Image (cartoon, grey):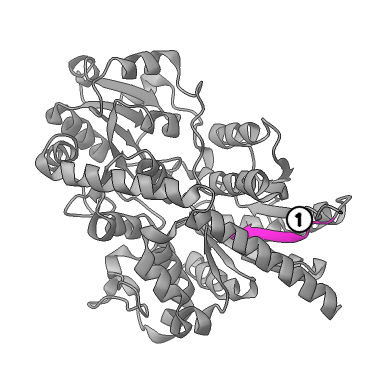
Amino acid sequence: MEKPKKLRAALLSSPGVGHLVPVIELGKRLVADHGFEVTVFVLSSRASHAEAEIIESAMTPKLLDVVELPSPDLSGTGLGPDAAVVTRLTVMMREARPAFRSVIAAMEVQPDVLIVDLFGTEHLCTGDELGIPKYVYVPSNAWFLALFIYSPTLDKEVKGEYVDLTKQLEIPGCKPVRPEDVVDPMLDRSDQQYHEYVRMAGEIPMGDGILLNVWEDLQAETLTALRNEEFLGRIANCPVYTIGPLTRPVRPAGLGTELLEWLDKQPSESVLFVSFGSGGTMSAEQLIELAWGLELSQQRFVWVLRKPTVKSLDGSFFDAGKGGVGDEVLSFLPSGFTERTHNIGFIIPSWAPQMEILSHPSVGGFLSHCGWNSTLESIVNGVPMVAWPLYAEQRLNATLLTEEIGVAVRPKELPSKKIVGREEIKKLVRMVMVEKEGHALRDRVKDLKSSAEKAMAKGGSSYESLCKMKEDCQMRIRHIKKAH
């Protein structure tokens, strides 16, 4: 009997570690568990050490083909040096369309399915040109997706700036969104990134389905609302497949010898990991308050320290892992800080192997910017969080983690709005690491870790959801062939 033909998937990732990791992990899962052949197309300038490392690790062992698209020339786009990250990403993806088309056209064997990340919705038309099914991968959570695809409706219904509203933004069947929690592109409706965001949301219905990096039990109510005819049927009219949590695997050799030896000496769950993801930065004043807060808490810590910036909270987005020599970074700390904390603290300049640190038995808390990749990495390792949202959809994530999922605590005021003082930082750190309130967070996150493992195992909800996506994809291919 003839073996069924393997489906060939083309996955397209926008630049940035936070987008690249979930796309590559999806590719690996499609190959290892579902019999696909996968080519991941990456728009990467290789300016970021972290991005280069991720691309190289994806190619060994060789489960996937990774094709790097040339970085587009943006000189004629009118993009200013201060353009927002979302604007830069969408313009880069738009300008890469001819290169992506020509690389696909030159492939010896054409793909059977196209999967783009949320910044690649303008490439969905390539799927139509090739006559293949096409999907949008949103590597975030269901509440973000609900707000995202409802944005074109809000754009018509809401007058004035969202942040000036006195009432919450209502999304059918979902938890309402507080004006201060809206995603970055919604902060200023006159900015280009807002128009790009609404456009992307409006293009999602062009796809044959949405892949989402969560699992059913994590957000059951929101997922039910999303799939309700009143909501998705009216707005996006396509299925939502929950396929997560897709996170980077732990690499045994990922930790440097010095850090590993230090972590091995610490008691179980006694170390707080402090990191703001691949792009997060803060002001010099906030960095000093954070240093004092860590010192006053008297808790052990590993801190990924990055140069402060006054320009923006996402100042390292396009150069994660670049620069930041030790002594230069240390000069921004309070006088005598490293000497006073040398027994309890370990400082890493600029970039760290996050998954390897979070999975170490001595790590018991994570002071995090709440990017969705980092959030999932914390949950799958059973580590509770101090939520410190900075940009993108992180404020929304922080509210979800503290008020709905129950695995984090957060400052009273948003760190993006106001300097969080050392005393409050000390209190939050101690709450997660040693106080009674932290025990409930720890129990809850360990339950979710177990729930996530079950979802990803063969027969689990996320495994079955990808099986369903494959079945639907094959049915769609047959339908397209018949139509032609």
Q: Is residue 334 left or right of residue 29?
A: left
Can you say whether 105 is above or below 152 in the image?
above
Q: Position of residue 84 (x, y in %)?
A: 48, 56
Can you say whether 252 is above or below 178 in the image?
above
Q: Is residue 175 left or right of residue 138?
A: left
Q: Position of residue 466 (x, y in %)?
A: 59, 58
Which portion, as a residue range, is magenta?
110-120
As drawn, the residue found furthest toward the front would be 1
| Residue depicted at 40% across the width and 75% down the height | 225
| Residue depicted at 70% across the width and 41% down the height | 64
Q: Is residue 37 left or right of residue 305?
A: right
The reply to whether residue 14 is in sight is yes
The residue where tag 1 is placed is 7
Magenta region includes residue 179 = no
Quadrant of the rendered image containing residue 362? top left
The reply to whether residue 187 is in sight is no
SS state under label 1? loop
**148 or 141: nearer the eye?**
141
Label 1: how many Cα within 10 Å (few below 14, some 14–19, many 20+): some
Please tell me how many numbered marks the rendered image carries. Answer: 1
Q: Position of residue 350 (x, y in %)?
A: 42, 30
Split into 4 quadrants, where in the image is the C terminus? bottom right
Split into 4 quadrants, where in the image is the N terminus? bottom right
**133 or 201: nearer the eye?**
133
| Residue depicted at 36% across the width and 84% down the height | 159
Q: Position of residue 449 (x, y in %)?
A: 36, 45
Say what amino acid the circle numbered 1 marks: Leu
Can you say whether 272 is above or below 96 in the image?
above
